[in-house]
C-alpha cells in the first residue's frame, strides 16, 4: 500500500518525520497558490488522485 | 474596452476621470496580479459572487472537538482546544506574488463559517439556494447544523428573551437582528500591548496560572480562593489559543520555506519566500521590528480571532502604530524605499478585501457590495495633541488609489492641525471616486468620547473606528473587546407611525409599540411629539436590556478565549472579554432615523399650525399609502425640509437630538455608563424601504428612506452645500449623540485641479468650524452612474459611497443605485 511518505508532495516535519505537509499547487479561476495541509507519513495514499511517486 | 482605454496615457486617463484604468496602468505587475486575482467576499444584492463558497473546515474541526470533549472539561477550555484544532489543521496557502500571508479559511475563495454562534445563521447558511455550499459537502454541513441546534450562543441567549423580544429581533423590521442572531463582534485590539509578542504574553499568563494555583489554596478567604478557579481556566484557555496562533504562523513559515527550497525557480521570488518564512517564524511570537513584520503580525492576529467569532469590522490605526517601523526602515536604516511601502500598503488592502464571512441574508442586504465594512483609521492627533499625520498616512492614501478596493476603507481623523499635504491626498482619494476616506472631526469626537464615557483626554486621542462610525480608544481600559451595542432599526421613522397608530404598525398588523393614546385626540403638536418620543424610548429600553443580558450570557456561558487573550485587562484579571469590564465606548445605532425630523415638522405645520388637515385625515392617507391623496401628499412633501438652513424644521431636528441625548442618560450599561445613540443607515435606507409604511413627510411604502443620520432627504436640500452644513451644524455633535452620518455629493467637473482642492479645503474648514462630526462624499457624475446602470459589465470597478461604507455601484440593487443618483450634487 502506497503511503503519503512515498509521495512527491509530502514534506516531513524536521522534528517528527511521521507527520508532514502535503503541498499542492492550485490554480483557481482567479489566482494560483500553493496549499499545505497536515498529513501523516503513513496515511494510505492508494485512493489519493494527487499521489505522485517520489 | 480594456484595450482601448489602456492605450491612453496616465494624464489622459486622469483628465477623462478613468481612474480604474489609471490605477491599472500605475500598479506594479504584482499588485495587478493580486488585485485582479482577489476573491471579493462582497455580495451583489444579498447573493455571494460567482465562485465564492462556504468553508466547512472551521465548522468541521470545531464540531469534532466539541463532540469528543469530556463533559467535565470547562467550556472555555473546549472552546480554546476547538480553535487550536482549526489553527493546527486548516490548510494554509500562499498566493503567487503575495508577501502578506494568512487567511481565515482554507482557500482564497472560501468564506469563514463560525457554527458556534447562531442557529439562525447556521440555518441561513445551509438553506442558501445559490450553491454556496457544494452538493458534495451539503450533508456534512447539515450534520454540523443539526449538532449545533440548541447549543449555540444564540440558543443560550433565547432562554432569557420573552416572546416579544424574540419576534421583534427575528422580524428585522423594527429592531435589527441582535448580537445573538448575527453573532458578530467589533474587536479593537490593543496594539501597543500586543506588540510585546505572544511569547511574552504567554509568560505572563503562565505566571498568573502559577500564582493563581497558589492563591486558590492560600488566600485568606474562601471567596477569594474559589474566585481563582474560573480565572485559572480562563488563563489556561488563553494560553492554548496564543500558542496555537504561533504554531499557525509557523505553518505558514514552513510552507514558504518549502516553496523556496523545492518549487520556486525565480531567485527574486525565492528570496521573498524566505523572507516570508523568517517573518512568520518570528511574529507574532516575538515583537515586530520592521514594517513588514508589523503588518504580518497584524494579519495573523486578524486571522486568529476571526476564526473564533465573526468580526464585522477591522479596527486599526496603521499609520500611527506602524510609524516607528517606517521611520526605522525607510528613514534610518533604509531597508525599504517609500515606493515599496506604498506597494506593501496596497497589497495589505487587497489581502483584507479578500476576507469574508458567512452572514445572515438580512445583513448581506443591508451591507450589499461590501465584505466588511473594514474601516481603517488614519490621521488624527497624537496623545500629546500634535498632528499625527505622517508620511505613512500619505503612503496609505496613495496606496488606496492603486488598490481601489471598496474594503477596507479609511476613516480620516481631521483636526485643526491636519497638515495640508495629507489633506491633499485625502481629496485625491475622494476625487478618484473611492467614496473614502470618510472624514471625522477630531476636535468634536475627542470631547464626545470624554463627555459620554469619561475617557481621559490622552486616551480619547487614541481613538479608532470600532465599526463604520463609532470611535473607541484602543487603550487598556477602553478598547472594546466585543460588540455590545444593539443596532436598532427604524425606531426613528417607525416610531412616527407607531405614534400615529397608538403602538400599532399597520404594515405588519402587529402591536409592536406601546400605547401612547389616540393621535386624533392630541390637541397640540407637543402631545404628538411626546407620543413619538415615548415610542422611541420604549423600544430603546427594551433593546438595551436585551444587550445587557446578551453580554452576560457570553460572559457566563459562551466566553471567547482567543479574543480575551488579546486584552491586557483580561490577562491581568483572568476574566474573559465579556466579563471583564471596560470603560465603555458603546452606542445604539438608529438606522433610517433621518425621516423623523421632517415627518414631525410636516405634522406640526399642516396639522397643528396651519390646520389644513386633521390627524384623522392624515392617518387615513397614511393607511392608504397616500393612494388617492396625491395633492395632500404633495403638501406634505413641500413642507419645510432639513438641509436648507430653515429654522422651522431645523428647530425640530435640534430638539429631537437633544432628546436623544436625554434618553441616553436614562439607562446605564453593565459598566455603569450611559448609552448614546448613533443615527446612520448603511444600506438600510433602501433595504428597510419595504418594511416601513408611508410616512408624513410624503414618503410612500417602498420609497427609499433618508440615508445617513443627518443627511437631508434625497433631493430635498435645494439651497447648496453651505445651507446643508448650517442645518447640520445646529446639532450638538458632542452632547446629543455618539456620532451622526452626513452624505454629500460633489461635482467632479467643478472640483478639478488645484482650484477644486482649494474649494474643498475651504468647505472642510467650514464643516470643521461648525463642529460637525462626520462627512463623506460621492464624486461621480450622474452620466457615469446612468451609463453603469445601462452597461454594468463596463463599469465593474465603479465605486460609490453608500452610508457608512463604499461599494461597487454595479453590485447594488436598483433601488440603492437610484437613491445614490437622487442625492443632490452640491455646487460651490
Ligand atoms: S498528494 Fe495525496 S498521497 Fe501525496 S502527500 Fe498529499 S495526500 Fe498524501
Image (cartoon, rainbow, N blue to C red):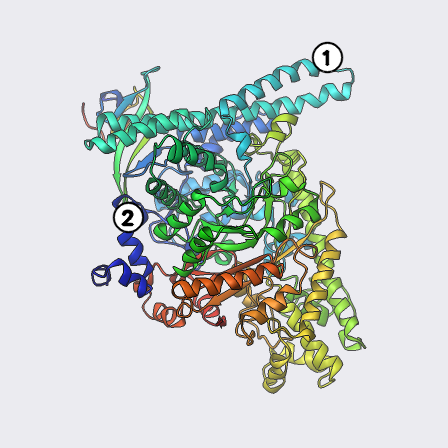
Is the CB of mark 2 within 8 Å of ligand 1? no
Residue sitting at x 60%, y 39%: B479
Q: Residue at x 51, y 51 (%)?
A: B412
Q: Position of residue B527 (x, y in %)?
A: 79, 71
Is B810 on the left or on the right of B595, as rendered? left
Q: Which residue is mark 2?
A: B32
Quadrant assignment for the N terminus of chain B: bottom left
Mark 2 belongs to which subunit?
Answer: B
Q: In the shown orientation, is residue B518 left or right of residue B487?
A: right
Q: Which residue is mark 1?
A: B218
- Image quadrant of residue B766? bottom right
Marks 2 and 1: which is nearer the front?
A: 2
Can residue B576 be seen?
Answer: yes
What x and y, as percent, mark residue B616?
73, 80
Q: Earlier in the sequence, mark 2 or mark 1?
A: 2
Give B165 or B714, whichever is nearer the viewer.
B714
Amino acid at each position: 500500500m502506497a503511503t503519503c511518505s512515498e509521495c512527491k508532495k509530502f514534506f516531513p516535519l524536521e522534528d517528527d518525520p511521521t507527520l508532514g505537509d502535503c503541498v499542492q499547487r492550485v490554480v483557481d479561476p482567479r489566482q494560483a497558490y500553493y496549499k499545505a495541509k497536515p498529513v501523516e507519513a503513513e496515511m494510505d495514499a492508494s485512493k489519493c488522485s494527487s499521489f505522485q511517486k517520489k | 474596452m480594456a484595450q482601448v482605454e489602456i492605450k491612453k496615457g496616465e494624464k489622459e486617463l486622469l483628465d477623462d476621470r478613468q481612474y480604474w484604468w489609471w490605477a491599472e496602468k500605475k500598479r506594479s505587475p504584482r499588485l495587478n496580479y493580486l488585485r485582479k486575482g482577489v476573491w471579493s467576499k462582497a455580495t451583489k444584492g444579498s447573493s455571494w459572487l460567482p465562485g465564492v463558497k462556504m468553508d466547512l473546515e472551521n465548522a468541521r474541526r470545531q464540531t469534532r472537538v466539541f463532540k469528543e470533549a469530556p463533559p467535565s472539561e470547562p467550556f472555555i477550555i473546549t472552546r480554546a482546544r476547538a480553535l487550536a484544532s482549526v489553527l493546527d489543521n486548516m490548510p494554509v496557502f500562499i498566493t503567487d506574488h503575495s508577501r502578506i500571508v494568512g487567511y481565515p479559511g482554507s482557500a482564497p475563495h472560501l468564506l469563514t463559517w463560525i457554527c458556534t454562534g447562531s442557529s439562525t445563521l447556521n440555518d441561513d447558511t445551509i438553506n442558501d439556494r445559490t450553491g454556496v455550499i457544494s452538493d458534495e459537502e451539503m450533508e456534512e454541513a447539515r450534520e454540523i447544523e443539526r449538532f449545533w441546534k440548541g447549543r449555540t450562543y444564540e440558543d443560550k441567549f433565547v432562554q432569557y428573551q420573552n416572546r416579544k423580544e424574540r419576534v421583534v429581533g427575528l422580524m428585522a423590521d423594527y429592531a435589527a437582528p441582535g448580537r445573538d442572531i448575527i453573532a458578530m463582534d467589533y474587536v479593537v485590539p490593543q496594539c501597543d500591548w500586543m506588540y510585546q509578542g505572544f511569547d511574552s504574553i504567554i509568560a505572563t499568563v503562565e505566571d498568573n496560572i502559577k500564582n493563581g494555583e497558589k492563591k486558590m489554596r492560600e488566600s485568606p478567604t474562601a471567596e477569594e480562593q474559589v474566585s481563582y478557579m474560573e480565572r485559572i481556566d480562563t488563563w489556561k484557555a488563553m494560553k492554548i489559543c496564543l500558542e496555537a496562533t504561533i504554531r499557525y504562523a509557523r505553518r505558514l513559515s514552513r510552507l514558504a520555506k518549502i516553496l523556496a527550497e523545492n518549487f520556486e525557480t525565480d531567485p527574486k521570488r525565492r528570496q521573498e519566500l524566505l523572507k516570508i518564512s523568517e517573518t512568520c517564524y518570528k511574529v507574532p511570537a516575538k515583537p515586530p521590528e520592521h514594517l513588514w513584520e508589523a503588518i504580518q503580525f497584524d494579519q495573523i492576529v486578524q486571522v486568529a480571532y476571526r476564526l473564533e467569532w465573526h468580526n464585522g469590522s477591522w479596527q486599526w490605526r496603521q499609520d500611527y502604530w506602524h510609524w516607528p517601523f517606517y521611520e526605522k526602515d525607510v528613514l534610518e536604516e533604509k531597508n525599504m524605499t517609500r515606493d515599496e511601502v506604498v506597494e506593501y500598503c496596497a497589497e495589505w488592502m487587497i489581502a483584507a478585501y479578500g476576507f469574508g464571512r458567512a452572514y445572515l441574508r438580512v445583513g448581506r442586504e443591508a451591507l450589499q457590495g461590501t465584505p466588511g465594512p473594514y474601516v481603517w483609521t488614519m490621521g488624527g492627533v497624537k496623545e500629546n495633541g500634535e498632528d499625527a499625520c505622517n508620511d505613512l498616512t500619505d503612503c496609505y492614501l496613495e496606496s488606496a488609489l492603486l488598490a481601489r478596493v471598496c474594503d477596507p476603507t479609511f476613516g480620516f481623523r481631521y483636526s485643526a492641525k491636519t497638515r495640508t499635504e495629507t489633506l491633499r491626498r485625502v481629496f485625491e482619494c475622494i476625487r478618484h471616486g473611492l467614496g473614502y476616506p470618510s472624514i471625522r472631526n477630531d476636535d468634536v469626537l475627542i470631547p464626545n468620547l470624554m463627555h459620554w464615557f469619561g475617557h481621559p483626554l490622552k486616551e480619547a486621542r487614541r481613538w479608532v473606528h470600532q465599526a463604520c462610525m463609532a470611535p473607541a480608544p484602543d487603550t487598556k481600559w477602553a478598547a472594546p473587546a466585543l460588540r455590545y451595542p444593539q443596532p436598532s432599526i427604524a425606531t426613528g421613522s417607525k416610531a412616527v407611525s407607531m405614534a400615529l397608530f397608538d403602538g400599532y404598525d399597520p404594515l405588519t398588523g402587529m402591536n409592536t409599540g406601546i400605547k401612547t393614546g389616540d393621535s386624533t385626540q392630541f390637541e397640540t403638536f407637543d402631545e404628538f411629539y411626546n407620543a413619538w418620543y415615548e415610542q422611541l424610548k420604549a423600544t430603546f429600553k427594551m433593546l438595551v436590556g436585551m444587550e445587557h443580558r446578551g453580554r452576560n450570557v457570553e460572559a457566563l456561558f459562551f466566553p471567547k478565549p482567543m479574543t480575551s487573550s488579546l486584552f491586557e485587562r483580561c490577562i491581568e484579571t483572568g476574566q474573559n472579554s465579556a466579563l471583564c469590564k471596560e470603560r465603555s465606548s458603546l452606542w445604539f445605532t438608529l438606522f433610517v432615523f433621518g425621516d423623523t425630523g421632517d415627518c414631525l415638522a410636516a405634522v406640526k405645520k399642516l396639522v397643528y399650525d396651519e390646520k389644513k388637515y386633521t390627524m384623522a385625515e392624515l392617518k387615513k392617507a397614511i393607511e392608504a399609502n397616500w393612494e388617492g391623496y396625491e395633492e395632500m401628499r404633495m403638501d406634505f412633501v413641500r413642507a419645510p425640509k432639513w438641509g436648507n438652513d430653515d429654522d422651522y424644521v431645523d428647530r425640530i431636528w435640534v430638539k429631537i437630538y437633544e432628546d436623544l441625548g436625554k434618553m441616553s442618560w436614562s439607562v446605564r450599561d453593565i459598566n455603569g455608563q450611559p448609552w448614546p445613540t448613533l443615527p446612520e443607515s448603511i444600506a438600510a435606507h433602501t433595504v428597510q424601504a419595504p418594511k416601513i409604511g408611508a410616512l408624513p413627510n410624503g414618503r410612500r411604502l417602498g420609497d427609499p428612506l433618508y440615508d445617513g443620520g443627518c443627511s437631508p432627504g434625497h433631493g430635498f436640500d435645494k439651497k447648496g452645500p453651505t445651507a446643508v452644513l448650517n442645518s447640520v451644524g445646529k446639532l450638538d455633535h458632542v452632547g446629543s449623540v455618539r456620532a451622526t452620518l452626513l452624505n454629500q455629493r460633489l461635482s467632479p467637473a467643478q472640483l478639478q485641479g488645484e482650484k477644486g482642492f482649494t474649494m474643498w479645503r475651504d468647505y472642510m474648514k467650514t464643516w470643521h468650524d461648525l463642529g460637525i462630526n462626520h462627512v463623506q462624499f460621492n464624486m461621480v457624475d450622474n452620466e457615469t452612474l446612468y451609463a453603469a446602470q445601462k452597461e454594468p459589465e463596463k463599469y465593474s470597478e465603479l465605486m460609490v459611497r453608500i452610508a457608512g461604507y463604499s461599494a461597487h455601484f454595479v453590485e447594488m440593487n436598483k433601488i440603492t443605485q437610484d437613491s445614490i443618483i437622487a442625492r443632490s450634487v452640491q455646487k460651490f
